Amino acid sequence: MGKKIGITGNEAIANAMRIANPDVCGAFPITPATEIMQRFCTFVSNGEVKTETVLAESEHSAMSACIGASAAGGRVATATAAQGLALMWEMLFIASGLRLPIVMGVANRALSAPLNIHGDHSDGMGARDCGWIHLYCEDAQEGYDNMLQAFRIGEHKDLRLPVMVGIDGFITSHSIQTAEYLDDDVARKFVGEYQQTLPALLDIKNPVSMGALILTDYYHEYRKAHEQVMMRVFKVVEDIGKEFEKISGRPYGLFESYRLEDAEVAIVVMSSAAGTTKEVVDEYRAKGIKAGLLKPRLYRPFPYTQIAEALKHVKAIAVLDRADCWGGSYGPLFTDITGALYGLDKKPVLINKIYGLGGRDYMPDQAEYTFNELIDLAKGGKVKAVKEYIGVRE
Amino acid sequence: MKLKTWKELPAGAVITEPGSARNFKTGSWRSYRPRWIEENCIQCLFCWVYCPDMSIVTKEGKMTGIDYDFCKGCGICALECPGKKGQKALVMEEEGK
Ligand code: SF4
Ligand code: SF4
């Protein structure tokens, strides 16, 4: 077994990158993800990895360097957050469209303006439809575990897709938590050597061109093909999760269910807020209330049918979003969950809470407030407002 | 040409056949076409140098005509052509006239 240590989420991500030993890292610093590349560059300087770092002049260039290196035929990783992820946006589609398995740690952070460096999911949600695989982590342990698995998932021969791994900015990225690293040898064996299973630019014996113009005659077909490769992600994520459990003892699936099997009321929430919510679930269970939680891990592609199956028996559900869509609509996770449940004959009552924007603390009393409302709804109470901001001054 | 279904496409739209741009005829983009007037041609080959495509056909170092399968009708060759005594050897004419 590995050793238990105190680490930040950023350290956890950087350490998983050390294990993967990428050929190239193109990067540009941005709070709260800076520490990932800072720590990783120490590994480079100390000769612990053979990575070539390309310290670019912007995130757009950093992702471009990653794309070039991945297209050339190397293992590639990087890290970013917030405005940095936003600046990469057009390049994110190029990475996925060219099917380049770049792995990126994201310390999820609010988008400006107003300028804010703290944790929320607006950056990741803004990039949710860019054809990447998205994994979200509750804590530093999951940051390390998911980052290791991300290389296996993205580089899998059936997929060849880029993966972003989100940890909550500051809450997870900067607080020191207990976590357990695998023995380096075990972790290295799990991640394995990079295998180039698609044509690469530097394979000079088999020359290829990438980035060709595809017009009305083929673009639609390529998008359908991308939609289909995304559907293959579920099985790969589950298989690799099982394999990882064997070496770590920590189970990983498409999402985590916590006391959900017989739950009558449930909260759906991602990342660090799930930890706080689990405490409140236990508190309500102790009072004899059948409370539960579902924590999405694989956010893109979204496991619609599997999540519907896991939630179908629940009477009332609150979906907590740490981001909002300002179109007069609901939070992004809420619309995914309603989409998942729409096909059920008997649908649970659903409400949406927006919490924790710009790093606003999510406290147990917010989960209690939400569960109390759900208990009333489960008894047949009327929905007062489908969407509500919680933890906000009125 | 029979178009492929989405199931038959190479991942990432990678092109594995070298020189396959040859299969993609771009001549239909043209609304003006260059016409070569051989008697005015001094064989300076400016047209061959300036053509942004490879649509000036040459044989043994001499201009012999235009490849209309690929010529997009940009007019650069006609602009650059010095011709003979002020008489252009390449002129642009509207397609379909
Ligand atoms: S019109 Fe343009 S493309 Fe056509 S031959 Fe002249 S320079 Fe080349
Ligand atoms: S530029 Fe004009 S003169 Fe010179 S080779 Fe071409 S057609 Fe002839």
Image: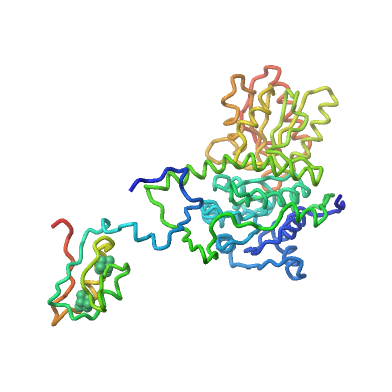
Q: Position of residue A220 (x, y in %)?
A: 42, 44
Residue toward you, A309 or B54: B54
Quadrant hosting residue A387: top right
Q: Is residue A380 above or below residue B62?
A: above
- Residue drawn at the location 53% of the way across and 58% of the way down: A199
Q: Quadrant of the C terminus of chain A?
A: top right
Quadrant hosting residue A77: bottom right
Q: Is residue A245 above or below residue A44?
A: above
Q: Position of residue A189 (x, y in %)?
A: 75, 54
Q: Is residue B28 above or below residue A49?
A: above
Instruction: Tell me, yes or no, if residue A306 can be seen here.
Output: yes
The residue furthest bottom is B85
Instruction: Tell me, yes or no, if residue A28 can be seen here.
Output: no
Q: Is residue A302 left or right of residue A271?
A: left
Q: Is residue A4 left or right of residue A117?
A: right
Q: Is residue B11 left or right of residue A31?
A: left
Q: Position of residue A282 (x, y in %)?
A: 82, 31
Q: Position of residue A223 (x, y in %)?
A: 47, 45
- Residue drawn at the location 34% of the way across and 57% of the way down: B23
How is the structure coloured here?
rainbow
- Residue drawn at the location 25% of the way across and 73% of the way down: B58
- Residue drawn at the location 30% of the way across and 57% of the way down: B25
Residue toward you, A33 or A47: A47
Residue toward you, A321 or A100: A100
